[in-house]
Amino acid sequence: MSGMRKAVGLALLLVLSGCSSNSTQQGMQSASPEKSVEAYTQLGLQYLRAGDTLSAKDALQRALEIDDDYADIYNGLALIFQVEQEYDLAEQNFREAVSLDSDSAVFHNNFGAFLYARGRYEEACKELARATEDPFYPRRAQSFENLGRCYQMIGREDAAQHAFERALRLSPSRPVALLELTDLHLRAGRLAEAQGYYDRFSVLIDRRQIEHSAQSLWLGIQLARLNGNGSRAATYSLLLKSLFPQSTEYALYKESMQ
């Protein structure tokens, strides 16, 4: 394969090794080509994590000189170009990464997140759906959450609900999925189901595992009103006003009071 390929390739969810840049460079001197390309790729990811995109690109280009079929390089460079807002180059390299390793949940998830951020929701949902297919992907629950939000953006409420439910089956305490399912059921008029998911979210709040968001407080206000619990609605209202006065949710709350 030609070394003229544009390079991209750092996985958003790739776990970086803990070795230092100096030790990585020293290890490259006597390593096999396979080890060298992995080491240069890891070095590039370390530089990217530190915010040094110039050094990150240099390391990944060195990896390309050794093996331009190594998909992780393209995934890494894609993330660099995304950070640098070189979106055409980012997309080109994301596509190269998934072409070289079409089974990588990480690559599909990262490419899907990129497309989502660009407002290309139909394409994003396809990539995110591919990311959920790997039953051994350690961040599969998060990918289902991402997919659920993507489906919401294209009006596929039933598919979104299914994705959020899958996320909770894999990881029962995912706050995003709990709130999104609360919202979905509340808007559909299914109060009992909405309250059930919100109660599970509230347990996480009580345990101080998470904090309230504008969304969670607005949902709490609506549920408290429907259940006739005026004092709880007032408490959530004060918190929403105090913590998130500029939020869309607070604007909705004020509108509901008129």
Image: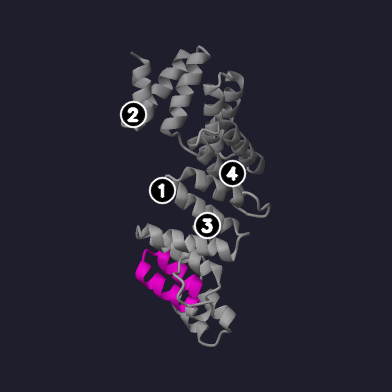
Q: Which mark is residue 144?
A: 4
Mark 3 belongs to which amino acid?
Leu
Task: Look at mark 1 in the image and give the residue it sits on.
Answer: 118
What number is the disc on residue 13?
Answer: 3
Gap between marks 1 and 3 measured at Cα = 19 Å
Mark found first going from the N terminus, 1 or 2: 1
Q: Are marks 1 and 2 in contact (CB under 8 Å)?
A: no
Q: Magenta residues: mostly which secondary structure? A: helix
Instruction: Tell me which corner region of the image, top left, top right, bottom left or bottom right, holds residue 156.
Output: top right
- The spot of residue 92 in percent (x, y) is 45, 62
Residue furthest to the bottom in view is 30
Q: 175 or 252: nearer the eye?
A: 252
Q: Name the residue: 46% across, 66% down.
A: 8
| 51 drawn magenta | yes
Asked whether residue 53 appears in the rendered view, the answer is yes
Tell which circle, 2 or 3, labels the residue nearer the N-terminal end.
3
Highlighted magenta segment, given as a residue range: 40-64
Query: Is 83 covered by the magenta stretch?
Result: no
